[in-house]
Amino acid sequence: MESAVRLDHNHELTVKDLPYIVTWREDRCKRCGRCTAVCPMHAIEPSVMVRREISSEDASPSPKVTRKTVVVVRQTTDIERYCTGCGSCTLVCPNDAIEPVFNPQHKFLFHKNPGGHPYRRGGRRNDPRESTLDHLKFTRISMLTDPALDAGRHEFRIRTYLGRILPPEEMPFRVKEGKLELMSGNSRFVPPVREIYPVMIGSMSVGALSPTMWEGLAMGVAYLNEVDRMPVVMASGEGGIPPRLLKSRFIKYFILQIASGYFGWDEIIRAIPDMADDPCAIEIKYGQGAKPGDGGLLMAEKVTKLISEIRGVPQGVDLPSPPTHQTKYSIEESVAKMIQAMSMAFGFRVPVFPKISGTRTARAVLNNLLRNPYAGGLSIDGEEGGTGAAYNVSLDKMGHPIASNIRDCYLDLARQGRQNELPLIAAGGVGKKGGLAANAAALIMLGASAVSVGKYMMQAAAGCFGDEMNRCNVCNIGKCPRGITTQDPRLYRRLDPEKVAERVVEVFRALDVELKKIFAPLGRSTELPIGMSDALCADDADIAQRLQIGYVC
Amino acid sequence: MCRLAAITSNEYLNPMECIGALETMHEGHDGSGMGLILKNLGGELAEFFDYPVLSGICSKDGLYTLEEYLFHAGFRLKHQWRPALKPVKGIKRRDHYFAKVYDYPEEYEDRSQEEKEELLLQTRLTLRRMGEENGSITVFSFYPDIVTIKEVGDPLQLGEFFGLTDSRLKAKIIFAQGRQNTNYDINLYACHPFFVQGFGSMTNGENTAFVPIREFLASRGFAGYSGYDSDSEVFTHILHYAVKKLGYPLHYYKDVITPLGEDDLARREDSEVLSLMRVALRPLCIDGPNVIIGFTPDGSCFMVHDAKKLRPGVVGGVRGRVGLVSEECGLESMVPERESAKGIFPMKYDMVIVSPGAQEVRVWNQLYGWTTIMN
Ligand code: SF4
Ligand code: SF4
């Protein structure tokens, strides 16, 4: 006889409390064990059940009882082993016998804090609604008075600039014999400016990503530049990049990030004399849209031999980066001197720009940067940006949407006549619903000079399972079922870097065509339509008013 | 699209020469208006070439306000040209059309040209503001040796209405535009040619990059970069900005509005300058199709296109008399004695520049440099 306590199963969860319920079809399952082996959470396990069957074979009832022990696949209700809905089990099941189903009544957040540890995860904001960007459309269609362009045949220049641009009045030109020439003696410092593709791959670190993923992205970027002649660049994220790449000529396609942990920078500084070329730019990370005010954290499991070498740290230890650059005591220190120091390290040949998380104080930062002649831009990462690891509360509730942040900053620059001097880079939730080109073009028309995408690339190039219904999102525990955010060779070997590279190229080619499909009917081809807000309308009056664009319904 | 006819010459011409050219291109304009700028004035205004001329239209009340204002600002009227209006069916007559020649306020007598120009600009903008709300004052230009006339109606009929055929108003440079109204309301301030501090231009086409260009110009801290009732006004202001504010030689206007692509740029001798220029002036890059015909204070006239303009304008004439028009038939009417096979149709990379007095015509090609066509 079982005790009453055991019978009522109090203090245990039911599957109805969990975000995903695994439906398993006994009649189809051939007990191969693939699903239980692949599950990153150990949310399902092989188990046995005793079945009692009552049957009667005679004309009049003569019940016979048989007891059978059967093998089943069972979902655990342990909150630490919750089913994330990743679907890996479905993917590997040869008989379509298993599938996770989202449970809208779940009570996950009520329980996901055992030991007093708040829920941490990867991914991005769990908000499946359309973003502001998806409420924008392009309504100024060229008709008759200004014939629309042919997206297929017309020549389009889809390029942007990264780096501080001198106002025309300050360009060191003089007229000699009816011609303009540069003033000799270099009377004026002309900051370095890079011409790049306006959509770049945002900062994802070598440690957060698996070696196969990072290599795939890097190969894709190199191919786009060298073969397709599309100057797409990629930001490294914190923690440096592999030494071989650092000293190769491909370094010019990479933006190196320095963050508050300064990981990897000993190695970078030491490599400078041997660098075959300059990096595209240096990004100083002050914040990240997905977790504003939080530093980075690379869990010990991910600090493998390669990572420890790149970052210059011992193997197998947690690598936290502080929330701020703590070696600097004030904004002047942390921004101005940092920018100057970085510029100087690369002989003032490399644009240096800070990245902040979306915030209502972005304009204060912007105006501070405007006064700094070495600041090469401002990257703003909105609240819908992604991360490898953060507290759920930061991901879900902290931060500022990118659309209005970029718009405010652009309008502020335009008021001062400096909209072409300090490029704004917009990030955070670009392509949330798959509309990468439309979102990117909308941000450009709101005033961004360039757009940065991370999570979109992971989804499109490597099939990341994550979404805004909290599917998967276990990037933080090193068990990424796709092999994207893990340092476990058994997992990352699942990912073929060549395929990732191929997808990166395909994504950018398709993006380029779609951007033309947007710009052509607007009659724009000669330059990127930065700030062309007359082309944009919102289908929501409040959004339109906030962004100072038209409203259509 | 609007029709454009400009003529530059070494002798004084009657504005009807240009209006007649517009008439030959009639199917291209819908009679929704005409704009006329005369530069290097002859006739009764010739002797006042040093004094600013205020051109505009006023209601009775407006005229009073305007005169009051100018009087208190210290401007003294020296002369005035008023058209001998003839009633023409379909043209709505307004109270006063004028070109008033003023002397500068006394305290400006010894001031620099810059300061004088600044005063004229501010005065024009103030007058515009004063009369904009109730439509009592419309002022087009306030500058020495320039007269501007704009009105709604068919160009030929307007010529008759203003009595231009027998008018003593003459000029060496005449710019005329017959409108095809693509703005929603007919607004005289949206009518080309546009003018600012000695620079003028008119355009046909549509400029889809208008908003970012407007935002850039309007934030340069120069009061003259305002108005923008038409997307074409930015072409005049870019011209002023490039040549006057930045001090670039005129032919760089082409490199500002339609910069070369990377590969072409590398082949230019001044490629270093050009690449910096392209970056710094990115917001001024236009997106057409557009043909622009303009003039500068020294009396040079030019025509330029962007790559999207599929039907180019044409420049042609004889030494001392050169026409710049949007359709060739206009040229036929203005300079019939020219060799028609020698008309210049500027292409994607070209800018045709006619020297003051139409003494020389040169083509600046962004890739290959200068070619002299006529001298
Ligand atoms: S969906 Fe993913 S987490 Fe859930 S049981 Fe299947 S493999 Fe495990
Ligand atoms: S597939 Fe990998 S990267 Fe994507 S959400 Fe899951 S753990 Fe994160």
Image (spheres, grey):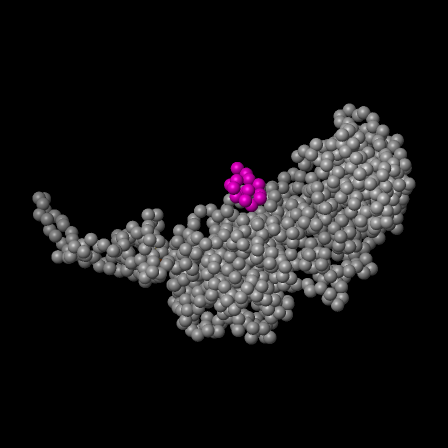
Q: Is residue B344 visible?
A: no
Q: Position of residue B89 (x, y in %)?
A: 77, 24
Look at 72% across and 32% down and name the residue there: B135
Q: Position of residue B36 (x, y in %)?
A: 80, 37
Given residues B84 and A152, the one toward you in this image is B84
Look at 85% across and 44% down and name the residue there: B106
**In this image, A438 relative to B38: left or right?**
left
Q: Position of residue B353 (x, y in %)?
A: 81, 49
**In this image, A250 relative to B227: left or right?**
left
Look at 69% across and 42% down and name the residue there: B228
Magenta highlight on residue A552:
yes
Q: Is residue A148 above or below residue B273?
A: above
Q: Is residue A349 visible?
A: yes
Q: Position of residue A530 (x, y in %)?
A: 61, 50
Given residues B50 and A140, the one toward you in this image is B50
Magenta highlight on residue A94:
no
Residue A148: quadrant of the picture: top right
Tell me the magenta residue range.
Answer: A540-553
Q: Is residue A531 above or below residue A492?
A: above
**Quadrant of the rendering where the N terminus of chain B is positioned:** top right
Given residues A416 and A221, the one toward you in this image is A416
Residue B79: quadrant of the picture: top right
**In this image, A334 relative to A298: left or right?**
right
Numbered-mark total: 0
Look at 72% across and 53% down and name the residue there: B256
